[in-house]
Amino acid sequence: MQAMTPSPPPTLDQVFTALADPTRRAILAMLLEDDMAVTDVAAPFSMSLAAISKHLGILAAAGLISQEKRGRVKWCKLEPDSLREASVWMQAFGQFEAVNLDAFERFLAQEFPDPDA
């Protein structure tokens, strides 16, 4: 049996790429409240479960969420510590205070409005 090597930590590029999409930001905002089943995450969106699963995969690859199977249900959990490196990077520019996810989401929504909204 071959030993598994741990995967490298997500890069800053992966985190910002994940945050660049409004659907993924909305998913993160939903997960601020509590862990959610994948089907519950998908419910408010007008896209297929497969499309939501792709978004969740990108968020998981960036370390922003973790996923765990409990019985037949796959659950998603926010991993806020993964934003630490991005927060430190932004603070280096002196124009951002410590990242509050709600405030950061509002900032991103203002700077990059959703054209479908």
Image (spheres, rainbow, N blue to C red):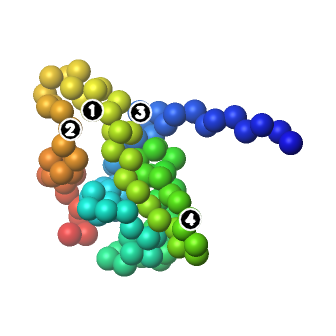
In the picture, measured across the screen, residue 54 lies left or right of residue 100, that is right
Mark 3 or mark 1: name the one nearer the start of the chain.
Answer: 3
Which residue does the numbered mark 1 point to in the structure image? Answer: 87
Q: What amino acid is at disc 4? A: Lys
Name the amino acid type tagged 1: Ser
Q: What label sits on residue 12 in the rendered view?
A: 3
Distance Cα–Cα, label 2 vs label 4 = 30 Å
Location of residue 115 (image quadrant) = bottom left
**Location of residue 15 in the rendering, given as x and y in whole percent from the top left corner:** 40, 41
- Asked if the residue under mark 1 is in contact with the one under mark 3, i.e. CB atoms within 8 Å, the reply is no
Q: Can you see residue 76? A: yes
Q: Earlier in the sequence, mark 2 or mark 1?
A: 1
Q: Secondary structure at mark 4?
A: strand
Q: Which residue appears at 32% of the width and 56% of the height?
A: 28
Which residue, given by chain and number where applicable, does mark 2 sit on? 99
> Looking at the image, do the residues carrying marks 2 and 1 touch, with CB atoms under 8 Å apart?
yes
Q: Residue at point 77% right, 37% down?
A: 3
SS for callout 1? helix
Mark 2 and mark 3: Cα distance apart in space? 15 Å
On-image quarter of the N terminus: top right
Looking at the image, residue 21 lies above or below residue 81: below
